[in-house]
Each structure stands twice: as C-alpha cells, then as structure tokens.
Image: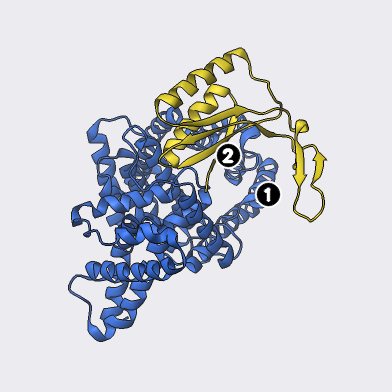
Amino acid sequence: MQYLISVIDNRTGSSTADEDAAIDAFNEQLVAGGHWVFAGGLSAPSDATVIDARGDGEPIFTDGPYLESKEHMAGFWVFEAPDLDVALKLAAAASKACNRRLEVRPFL
Amino acid sequence: MSDVQEAITRVHHEEWARVVASLTRRFGDLDIAEEAAAEAFATAVERWPADGVPPNPGAWLTTTANRRAIDRIRRESKRDDKQKEAQMSYDEPPEPLGVIDDERLRLIFTCCHPALAMETRVALTLRMIGGLTVPEIARGFLVQETAMGQRITRAKAKIKAAKIPYRVPAAEDLPGRVSGVLAVLFLVFNEGYLATGPDTDPVRQELTAEAIRLTRLIRALLPDDGEVAGLLALMLLIEARRTARVSATGELISLRDQDRGAWDTALVAEGHRLVRERLATRQPPGRYQILAAINAVHTSARDAADTDWSQVVALYDQLVRVDRSPIVALNRAIAVAELDGPEVALATIDRLDDKLSGYHAYHAARADLLRRLGRSQESRAAYDAAIELAENTAEVAYLSRRRDQLVS
C-alpha cells in the first residue's frame, strides 16, 4: 500500500538548515524501515504550467497553477506502508522533521 | 411482543456486533459485513416465527450472514475481478469461538479511528457495534437520513481506500486509542442525557441506554482498564438520577432539589462498586474515574445538605491536574461555593469569562451565585445569557423559572 504525503506550506524552499538535517535523518529511517518510495521538494506554484490536450486542436498551455490557494504542496513523500496506522505514525515523524503540516492520502 | 419477537430483539442486541465483526474479519470489508449481517437478521425475522428460534442463534446468524456475503461476492466478482482475493478467503475454516470477542474489539477500534471525524466515529460505532439502523441514528442526532447514510457510506469507503486497519492497537498506542473510544461513547451518552434542540425530549433514554450498553461491552473486553470502568461508573451514577432529573412539567430539577428516593438504587450500587474497585487498585485515576468518584460522593449523600463538599472539592483539585479544561475549573468553582461561599466562587468564575462566555452553564452558574449574593439585576442578565445559549428544553424551563423568581 502506498501513500502520498503532501507537505503543506504557504512558501516554497523555505526550510531551514536544521529542518533539512532532520528531514535527511528521517529519510534514512524511511529507507532502513523499507518505507521509502520517493520524495522531493517542489518549486513555487507560480512556476507551474497547466496543459490541456483533450480537444482535437493543439495542446493549450496556461501559465500558473491549476488552483490558486494560500497554501499549496511544497513537497511530498511517497511511503510504502502496510496500513494507515503505520502511514500516520511515519507522517507524524515526518511532520516533526520538516516542521510543517502534512496531508496523507492513499493511492488507489 | 411475542416470545419470538423478544428473542429476536435480545439476539440482535447480543449478537449484532459479533456477526459484523466476524464477517469483517473473514471478508476484510465492512460494507459487505454490515449488509450481510442486516440480511441475516431480516431472514431471522421472517423465518423464526414459523421455524422457531434456533438452539444457537448466534451461530445460525453468522452462518446465514456468511452465505449472504459469499453470494454478494460471487455476484460482484462476475463483474469485478478485484473481488477475487476476498472470494478465495471464504474457504478458510471459521475462527474458533474464543477470538470472536477480540474481533468486536477490533471493530470498535476501526469505527473510532482518529483519522475519522468525531461525528463519523459516533455514527459508525452506533451502526456497526450498536446495530442501530441509519434512520435511528439520524433521529438520534437530528440529521437527515440521507445525510447520515452518506456519512456512513463515505466512512466505509475511506476505511477501505486508506486501509484503516482492523486490529487492536499495539500496547503503546492502546491508552490513547481507548480514550478515543470512550470519548465517542461519552458523547453519545451526553447527547442522551442533555439532548439538544427545541423539538426533542430533554432526556433521550435510547441514547443513554445504548451508550451504557456499549460501555459495558468494552468493559467486558478490557476488564483491567481503569478509565473504561470509570466511564461506566460515571454513566451509571448519572443514569441512576434520570427519572428524578426532570419534573412532570418538563423542567430540569437541580441535584439539590431532586427526590433522592426516586434514584435507581441498583444503578447507584453498581456505580459505587466500580468506584471502590478502582480505588482498591491504588493506580492513579484518569478523568473518568475522578468524575465517577465525584458522582459517587453526591449519590452517597442522604440529602443535599449531607453532601461531603470538602471531598468533592478535593476530587476536583485532582481532576484539574489531569484535565486543564475551563469547564472543569467552572465545576470546581461551583463546588467551592458550597464550601467557601458564593463570593469566592464568583471571583474564580469571573476569571473564566474569556474562555466560557459562549457556554450556557457558565452564565447559569454566575446567575445562581449572583442571586445568592443578592445582586438581582446582574443575576437576571446572567440568566438571560444562559437561556439564550441553552439548548436543552428542560434546562431552559428551569432557568426561566429561576429568573422569574428573582426579586427586582
């Protein structure tokens, strides 16, 4: 079972050196426990481009994110975990490490 | 009610959670378990009046429900290959009877999972453990049947999609998770004990009774848990006073004025026994045990004047240490008024204004203290504020009469 852990923030690339160190240490634990799938930080929502190629014509590119909001996904993890209890425990440790609120959402 | 109907009602109370739990374990799907259990009970209602109640009704229901579940899975697996996994597992031999109680406990922890909203936990617990129907739960919480149905459907979908586990939490997580389960049961009890809304009865006995029944079940499953015993004792000692708490005209009667002869002595005795049992363990009590002990002091007094207020205040002092909520501080101050007089209590209560000004009991307590101090005008204003915020019809009636009795 895989879970997407979104890091909720109102800024991007704002982590401190201490937070970065804590995230590295947490990631090592993830790998050691067999929970690591992938993780990464994202650049600002204003760097995003929305693509729509559903029609017959040329794809349409729109500058900016698909959703304007005060808070956004500033980074994410993908955890491998047997159930939500394990995912929530890991996410609690992740939230402490990166010092941000997180959202846990299961993959289909 | 005929003997068979009575038997069906009794078996429903005793076996519903067991059947749902054992099917959930076997098929790994709450939705299938719930539907098949409901169908099995419907079949019992149809067949038992003619065929008689089977010698082992629980086993009959589980077998019938298992067949219904397998039928559904077969039907669906023709359309959907994803069910194959579940389809394979029904050939496993049934679990030995001993672990079934554990299964009910698993079910309770799944229904009260912290990743579900509180109102969802309440609804799921009443449906899956209590066996209440969706319309019954909707009526209990004054929401539309369709909305309640959707809430339960969404919860089942989340449990499945997010893989909320079906198991008893690890020892280190157990106290926190048990306390989450108790919060759900206490909420159900409180909604029955102080029902909210202008069009409901002031006391909803079906909710208090269901909360007590479920707490008894958890007590049977976790007999060594002090807080479970504490919550059960607390509920019993409150429930014991139920008939004395509301007058024939639908007005709340305060503890001081209740006819103590109308209290249910069997419930009082059972509550006291549980409190004594916990005291004998000499383990530090949690909030429910302390609240139960406070209620035990009240229910030990022959009349209001006989109440051991110093003991009540000492227990509130203990409670304040484990529960910092301003509501506890308010209740402590109300007890202090009996010991040190209304002036001392009022000074304490006034300091809670920023936290409790939206809470009717805060204004009701102030109104009473101001009345006792002869400050009628301020008391009237406080009664007005309390009446404005109170949601229980019997409480509104009581507060209105007290206000109107003030000498201006």
Indicate the position of residue B200 as horizontal and vertical percent values.
Answer: 55, 64
Residue A49 image point, x, y percent: 77, 37
Which scheme is used to colour this image of the protein? Answer: by chain
Tell me where residue A39 sits by quadrant: top right
The residue under the point 55% across, 34% down is B326
Q: Colour of chain A?
A: yellow
Q: Secondary structure at mark 1?
A: helix
Chain letter of mark 2 equals B
Question: Which tint was used for chain B?
Answer: blue
Q: Quadrant of the N terminus of chain B?
A: bottom left
> Distance of mark 1 from mark 2, alpha carbons?
14 Å
**With respect to residue B352, does B393 lie above or below?**
below
Pointer 1 with pointer 2, Cβ within 8 A: no
Task: Give residue A37's mark.
Answer: none
Q: Which residue is mark 2?
A: B369
Graded by Cα atoms within 10 Å as few (under 14), some (14 to 19) or many (20 or more), the crowding at tag 2 reads: many
Vertical relation: B365 (above or below) B92: above
Q: Chain of mark 1?
A: B
| Position in image of residue A63 (x %, y %) | 82, 37
Furthest toward the top, the residue is: A17
Q: Is residue B108 left or right of residue B360?
A: left
Could you tell me residue B378's position as x and y percent? 69, 41
- The mark that comes first in sequence, 1 or 2, is 2
**Kind of residue at disc 2:** Leu
Nearer-the-camera pick, B33 or B190:
B33
Residue B384 circle label: 1
Inspect the image, locate mark 1, and give the three-letter code of the amino acid beneath it: Asp
Residue B324 visible: no
- Residue A103 visible, this angle: yes
* Number of callouts: 2
Instruction: Classify mark 2: helix, strand or loop.
Output: helix
Residue plotted at (40% across, 43% down):
B305
